Image: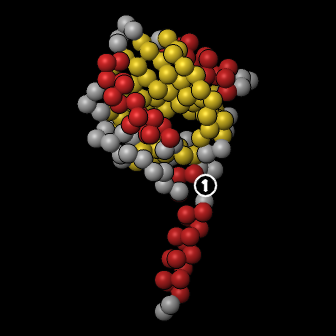
């Protein structure tokens, strides 16, 4: 029967054309999928997903996490401001960017007390704002920032 190979080919083409996580992002390391949010990304190479919390990942010198917060009458920037204020730390830079055509903010933060620097990506999904954050010791940031940002650029949203 020749219909099965043809059907498989049609399905493969359809998946390749669908937006979001069906279209696997390119990135440096393993793929992390948060099905509840419809978000996926490649975590940095040589990092692993935390077996106790699949919304967190870790490397030798750093940690990453995926969080979300309801918009509740706020716009993206208002929600980002509230999330940043709740975590403390000093905002070093804030850049407008996009994730799958959605407005996004990339924020570089430094926590002098804990001597860590984080790159944080915020973007809307439905009625919430999702944050993907990757943090490393400040002394390691200059060496690792390219890999961290490559991971954030791999973020995709389905739907």
Give coordinates of residue 108: x percent, y percent. 49, 22
- 44 sits left or right of 126 in the view: left
Q: Nearer the viewer, residue 33 or 103?
A: 103
Identify the residue at horizontal 57%, vertical 75% (top origin).
10
Quarter assignment of residue 97: top right
Q: How many marks?
A: 1
How many C-alpha atoms fall within 10 Å of the one at disc 1: few (<14), some, or many (≥20)?
some
Note whether residue 62 is visible.
no
Q: Nearer the viewer, residue 98 or 88?
A: 98
Give coordinates of residue 24: x percent, y percent. 48, 54
Identify the residue at horizontal 36%, vertical 24% (top origin).
141
Give coordinates of residue 101: x percent, y percent. 65, 44
Judged from this view, the residue extending furthest toward the bottom is: 1
Q: Secondary structure at mark 1?
A: loop
Q: Is residue 70 above or below residue 157?
A: above
Give coordinates of residue 15: x percent, y percent. 55, 64
The colour scheme used to paint the residues is secondary structure
Identify the residue at horizontal 43%, vertical 23% (top origin).
118
Q: Is residue 111 above or below residue 107?
A: above
Quarter assignment of residue 14: bottom right
| Residue at the disc numbered 1 | 19
Judged from this view, the residue extending furthest toward the top is: 113
Note whether residue 12 is visible.
yes
């Amino acid at each position: 029967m020749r219909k099965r190979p043809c059907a498989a080919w049609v399905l493969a083409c359809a998946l390749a054309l669908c937006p979001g996580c069906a279209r696997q992002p390119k990135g440096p390391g393993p793929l992390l999928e948060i099905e509840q949010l419809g978000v996926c990304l490649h975590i940095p190479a040589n990092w692993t997903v935390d077996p106790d919390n699949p919304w967190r990942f870790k490397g030798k010198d750093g940690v990453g996490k995926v969080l979300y917060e309801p918009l509740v009458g706020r716009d993206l920037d208002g929600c980002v401001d509230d999330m940043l204020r709740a975590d403390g730390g000093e905002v070093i830079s804030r850049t407008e960017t996009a994730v799958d055509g959605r407005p996004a903010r990339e924020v570089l933060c430094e926590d002098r007390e804990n001597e860590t620097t984080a790159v944080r990506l915020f973007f809307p999904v439905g009625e919430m704002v999702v944050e993907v954050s990757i943090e490393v010791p400040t002394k390691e940031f200059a060496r690792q920032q390219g890999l961290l940002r490559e991971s954030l650029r791999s973020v995709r949203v389905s739907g």
